[in-house]
Amino acid sequence: MKTALITGATAGFGESAARAFVKAGWRVIGTGRRAERLDALAAELGDAFHPAVFDIRDEAARDAALDSLPEAFRGIDLLVNNAGLALGLEPAQKASLDNWKTMIDTNVTALSSITHRLLPLLVERRGAIINLSSVAGTYPYPGGNVYAATKAFVRQLSLALRADLHGTGVRVTSVEPGMAETEFTLVRTGSQQSSDTLYSGVQPMTGDDIAETLLWIANLPPHLNINRIELMPVNQSWQAFAIHREG
């Protein structure tokens, strides 16, 4: 039985992925700050799920949780770097610097740090890393600013890891979703009404959609690597470049 560590398992993609992987016969370590949600998942999923409560930005708490894993969960074969957030929709000149720093600390620094921490084990076990990026890392939009930049970092780090891990058997994938309806949007917009308005008349992707994609990637034969995969709902595509005209 293989073991996956999924960060940010208390909601959205991470919660759906925890369910999907356990159902498919994996052991799952689910991390997050909200103990009550992880405990609820543990009650639902049983002995195949281990809750690890810590803030992904707190390296000491992370290391303590990893060092105290039960023996059955110590052989991590897959790291799913899902924990992340977007804060604010303001243009850069009006954005909160604290929001910027929080996004960088979470989406860039913490993701890099836990990856670095687990790389020796993943190399030893010829494991895999799946990083959750976003279409925002490729296609900028007004108000995306630092969030989009953090997701571009995740995509590029994934490709760079592939280069460095050449010959080790470790697979690395950047998963880049478009519009998906999860709690992520509530955190960013701050209201259920704003979230409902955004998805009105649209059939967005769901956490389950992304979880099935993650599981498919993880279960591919070990000689296959998906470098990056971009997903959008059919209702989402692109617009023309914005043009500002003087006068």
Image (cartoon, rainbow, N blue to C red):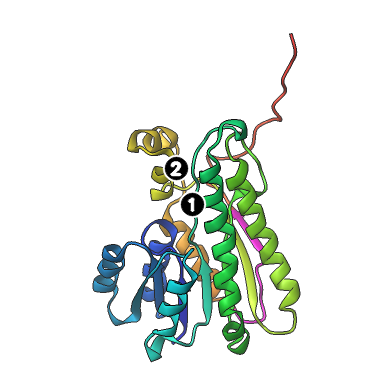
**Is residue 98 or residue 161 the one in the foreground?**
98
Queried whether the magenta region covers residue 176, the answer comes back as no
Question: Which corner quadrant of the image does residue 202 belong to?
Answer: top left
Q: Residue at x 34, y 81 (%)?
A: 48
Question: Which mark is on residue 188?
Answer: 2
**Residue type at the position of mark 2:** Arg
Horizontal relation, residue 102 to residue 116: left or right: left
Q: Residue at x 62, y 41 (%)?
A: 145
- Residue 146 visible? The answer is yes
- Residue 24 visible? The answer is no
**Residue type at the position of mark 1:** Leu
* Up-down relation of residue 96 to residue 155 (above or below): above
Q: Residue at x 38, y 49 (%)?
A: 183
Queried whether the magenta region covers residue 227, the answer comes back as yes
* Up-down relation of residue 188 to residue 113 (above or below): above
Q: Which residues are magenta?
A: 221-230
Q: Check disc 2 and report its element: helix, strand or loop.
A: helix
Q: Are marks 1 and 2 in contact (CB under 8 Å)?
A: yes
Image quadrant in which the N terminus is located = bottom left
User: Measured from the top left, where is residue 34 in percent x and y?
Assistant: 32, 62
Residue at mark 1: 85
Dot 1, how many residues are within 10 Å of its Cα: few (below 14), some (14-19), or many (20+)? some
